[in-house]
Amino acid sequence: MARQWNKDEILDAIQRMSVLEDRKPKWEDFAPPVRKSFPPISSICKAFGSWSEALKAAGFEPRQMPFRTGPFKKETRQKMSEARMGWKPSEKTRKRMSLSAKKRAQRDGIWSKGLTKDDHPTLERMSQEISGENNPMYGHFGDLNPMFGRKHSKETRKKISVCRLGELNPMFGKKHPSETIAKMSASKIGEKNPAWQGGIAKNPYPPNFRRSLKGQIRKRDNSTCQLCLRPGKSVHHIDYEKSNLYPQNLITLCRSCNSRINTNRRFWQACLTELQVFRFAQASG
Ligand SMILES: [Zn+2]
């Protein structure tokens, strides 16, 4: 069985260590493998609460913890993040990290309540600390991103999704302010929209693309969306050319499918062309 050390014996051992090393003892002096007739650091911490306390009790000035006075320098952050990328916490460390996060959440009780930086000074400070260049992910685009070319596992995606559902979503029961809505909308107008086709939406429909023609096409297709077979009224130009009024180029779709075929146009054109060729062959044969 390991030897039991009482406080006096430990203080005596710290004194002996200072004589032996001719300097203020460090906790590393008591780290395993422990020298003969000296207590291990674990016993010291158990007896005094921490190494600093033990050192104080032995009459030494404990080491000052270096504290941050501001954000780290960019190079420092770079170095730290490079080192971080190769690091994977062990099972034990991960458990400890998750436990401490849980405890912190319980203590502060601020994390699951959807508070923002406007509500809480701590959050405000934290938000400033990680904004812009201070953010550890700043400039980490593309292959600098630790997730580059990788995918989260199914379980992880599930976890990520679950913790943003319903009340847990920071936007739950809230609306964006009208300015934000205006900004979001402006960022998707015209050329900025991924579905932008160079302004052809404003090209006029030719005069003979009238109700009568559309009516004929709908009648032909039985007012049924030819993609999903639900009721549909939209008459779509398969080659996206408004002037091509050839009946084979026109097809009835529902609103949902009609908006779906506005992206991935090449695919849909090929798909619907094939469908029409088949339908027309059936009709004539
Ligand atoms: Zn449809």
Image: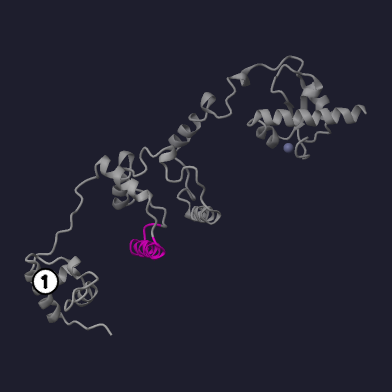
Residue 86 picture location, percent across and down: 38, 51
What are the residue bounds of the magenta stretch?
Answer: 90-111
The secondary structure type at the circle numbered 1 is helix
Image point (88%, 28%), residue name: 281
Q: Nearer the viewer, residue 211 or 82?
A: 82
Q: Main secondary structure of the magenta part?
A: helix
Residue 154: horizontal and vertical position, in percent?
55, 54
Under mark 1, the amino acid is Met
Q: Is mark 1 within 8 Å of ligand 1?
A: no
Quarter holding the N terminus? bottom left
Quarter holding residue 75: top left
Please identify the quadrant where the C terminus is shown: top right
Inspect this view and state whether residue 130 appears.
Answer: yes
Q: Which residue is mark 1?
A: 17
Q: Is residue 82 left or right of residue 145?
A: left
Q: Name the residue: 53% across, 24% down.
A: 191
Q: How is the image coloured?
A: one colour
Residue at 38% x, 49% y is 85
Residue 212 visible to the viewer = no
Quadrant assignment, res 212: top right
Residue 98 colored in magenta in the image: yes
In the image, is residue 181 above or below residue 1? above
